Image (cartoon, helix red, strand yellow):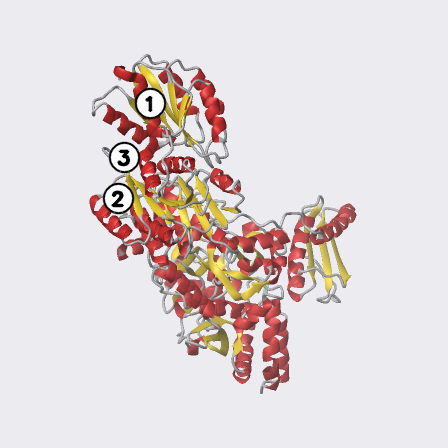
Amino acid sequence: MSNPLSTPGAVVNVGADLLADAIADQATPVTRVDWRPPMTGTEADLATVAADPLRRTANERALAAMLDVTANLVDVAPASEVLGLQRGEFLHAGPPIAWERASGPLRGGLMAGAALEGLVDDPEDAAALFESGSGVSLEPCHHRSTVGPMAGVVTPSMWMFVLEDATTGRRTYCSLNEGLGKVLRYGAYGPEVLTRLRWMRDVLGPLLQQAVRATGAVDVTGILTQMLQMGDEAHNRNRAGTLMLLRDLAPALVRSAAAPDDIAEAFRFIGSNDHFFLNLAMPACKLALDAARGIEGSTMVVAMARNGTDFGIQVAGTGDEWFTGPAQLADGLFLGSYGPDDANPDIGDSAITETAGIGGFAMATAPAIVRLVGGSVPDALATTRRMHEITLGENPRWTVPVLEFQGTPSGIDVTKVCRTGILPQINTGMAGKVAGTGQVGAGLVTPPAEIFPKALARLAELTRQRQ
Amino acid sequence: MTTPTFGHVELRAGAYADSVTLLQVSRAVQGLDGVLAAQVAMATALNIEVLTEMGFEVPTEATTNDMVVALRLADEGALAAALAGVDQALRDANRRPEGSSEVAAPRTTGSALRRTAGTPGDEIVVVSVPGPSALVEAMDAVDAGRDVLVFSDNVPVEQEVALKRAAAERGVLVMGPDCGTAVVGGLGLGFANVVSPGPVGIVAASGTGCQQLLALLDHAGVGVGSALGVGGRDLSSEVRGASTREALRRLDEDPAVELVVVISKPPAADVATEIEAYAASLATPVEFALLGEGRPDLTAAAESVLRRLGRDVPAWPVTGEAGRGSGAIRGLFVGGTLKTEAQLIAAEHISGQDGGHSFVDFGDDEYTSGRAHPMIDPSLRLEHLARAAADPATGVLLLDVVLGHGAEPDPAALLAPAVAAVDQPVVIAVVGTVGDPQGRDRQVRALVDAGAEVHLSNAGATRRALELLGDNA
């Protein structure tokens, strides 16, 4: 509590500069806020939510709940076992969507999945199956404690990483990463895609299960702590994390009962796939964020996800409701002769990393990523600093050495986004918009701005209902 | 391809750049004249596949440690320039970029407070954003447990109630909304006069009323440690004195404060009872200076404070001497409370009849929408001054000049020549202290030289204006 009769040591001035000048003239340091009007039409809702007596403590609880979670890799098992996924059930990235509105890469991923499950012999035949809808159903990964990169298609026979919060026993899941290029998650469904998926199902999955069960829990949150100090931001760069995982599992892999050629192939596959760890970073982030779900009055975002058509967010204080708007095109660089016309709008659950304060939010720790948009190292530092403007706090475990070990910006606050107009910065891969294409590039993207005022309006409505 | 083109593929063993850099290099080379397609990449299996699809033949001996430069050109003549372009792009990619790593200013009050958290000394927040956004910024201060002055007006009363309720839970003092003046531990906030520390603590629902009291006490040699504004609606039946209580509690806790003065319009009746009961429970005596019809004016309140402290009441300074006038008073004010005080005194003097006097507050919302407050921008009042002087019904011009931090740096510079051009007598209340940045005595001298009669007391100036009209009033 302040004592008004001690002279203030400093002043924060928001508004007229003249008032700041008058204070500076009295030899008192003044911090000048660069205030600008909030997003159009949000003033009344912002005031309502700011005045909500639940808000401050609800946000403190939400942030603490998220930061308290330690995610351990405890098992690898088929989705049919750990998620109870039945034949014909498909999970996908992003908010709910039906086949009719699904984008090319999501369709391509679903077609590859249908062929993998033997629902069709030729992936091309799957389009008719999904159009008819008979015996198939689509559901967001997020509705099943799961996250999936890009198309995020999960089918019953796919092997899943199982992550667990040691304190509560809560679990989250993610499929195994296929590598780059022509892969299911980028919407490709050619023979090489299916061959790889079958090998992952028949060889890699069982081998990883043996290795993880023999090794015991692997502290994924701890690996994230280390990799953030090694140039990875854990969304578009997972190189150090992948190798640390391989290091931790190597003894058990070597001792497993599998054939030496299969073990060698597993080493080669994981070691040459810089994104292998992404599929552990994502469920670790989801496990942390899920701890903040359902906290009444909290304005913290707990999920950002895209299905290639819609970008959706979920907020701690608004239950499982999705606030959606059109997914945007990433700004970045293209592979080969691909160009902007070939790219599909933003897709994937991988923005869960930004939601948890890494990925684009930790750009400062991975300056190489900023070149995706022809930026510079100062841009990377500025991006991470800018994300602190829209977040509730800092992660004491995940720190950025070049910013004097400042914690990563954590807990996106819907109200701060609406107040500043600063949108979350997401690092992402770009899928080809035509089903079957695969990856066409990588770059930076933001959510559609309008989803934040939508979420704010709902928060304000709930606040008024409580009064 | 229908036209003949020239393909070139070369391996650069041991050359390395990360894939992102190479994407950027490829893009740069693609932009060169004569280059149809360019791909510079490490020879990974994936990249070889991409290159093959593009129609390039990559030598079979390529390993992942080789860099491939693959170019498709309009003709062979473009090769040298294209390869030079590759080398340039690779060099550019490694060049240290220019640009500043300077940290951008915080965008919200909360961000500013978070950045400075942990620095010694209490921080205070001053909010003057447009009214509809004021609560949001002020609430950041409350969340951080910091006292806040809300200078903004047009804040809905229900928001004021919500803000002050949250503040009360956190032990935070909210000064305002619409709080123009505060002195906190000697630091002036908003429009505040420079005063010496002393035994008086002020709780003020009125900005210029507070400034008049500061100026009079300063002249009498009595210092003020803190003057805490609470906003004009604080003692209304909606807000119920939330900030007045917290301000009283803070001042009561300060051992240097011997007497607390509350300046306000009369509170709502039920609120008055509550606040008086609260004040009576404090160890420090509280003097209520409630302004309104039939009540003592600000100068009388200052005199009462001095007597209660056992100090002598000085003669309030008057400099210059205006001549007599004939007609009515034209009061042109920048301070709302000063205008109301003058109006009440004039009404009392003529027993409630309309003496034809008129009083305008140029700080009122109808004059400030879209323009700066007249304490900063004098042009509107100067315009009205010339107009009033040209009116034969104007008998005396009565003005105020409010000094202090934040106010116009040299008000006499424009006002003195305007006064000199007026035929009627001009009486001015200059509300300020000798320490004020404008130099009170210099301001007074300039106005007197222009022919005005200058008072420190606004009530004194008003009575003098009435007196100058004599029986004509």
Residue B113 x, y percent position in the rendering: 48, 53
Q: Badge 1 sits on which subunit?
A: B
Circles 3 and 1: CB atoms closer than 8 Å? no
Which numbered mark, 3 or 2, is in the foreground of this view?
3
Q: State the SS at label 2.
A: loop
**Dot 2, crowdedness within 10 Å: few (<14), some or many (≥20)?**
some
Q: Which mark is residue B236?
A: 2
**Disc number for residue B464:** 1
Q: Quadrant of residue A54?
A: bottom left
Amino acid of disc 1: Arg
Image location of residue A111, percent across then percent down: 47, 65
Camera-nearest residue between B267 and A34: B267
- Residue marked by disc 3: B296
- Tell me the distance, in whole angstroms, between the alpha carbons under discs 2 and 1: 34 Å
Q: Where is residue B390 shown, x and y percent of the image?
A: 37, 13
Mark whose residue sits in front, 2 or 1: 1
The quarter of the displayed image where residue B361 is located: top left
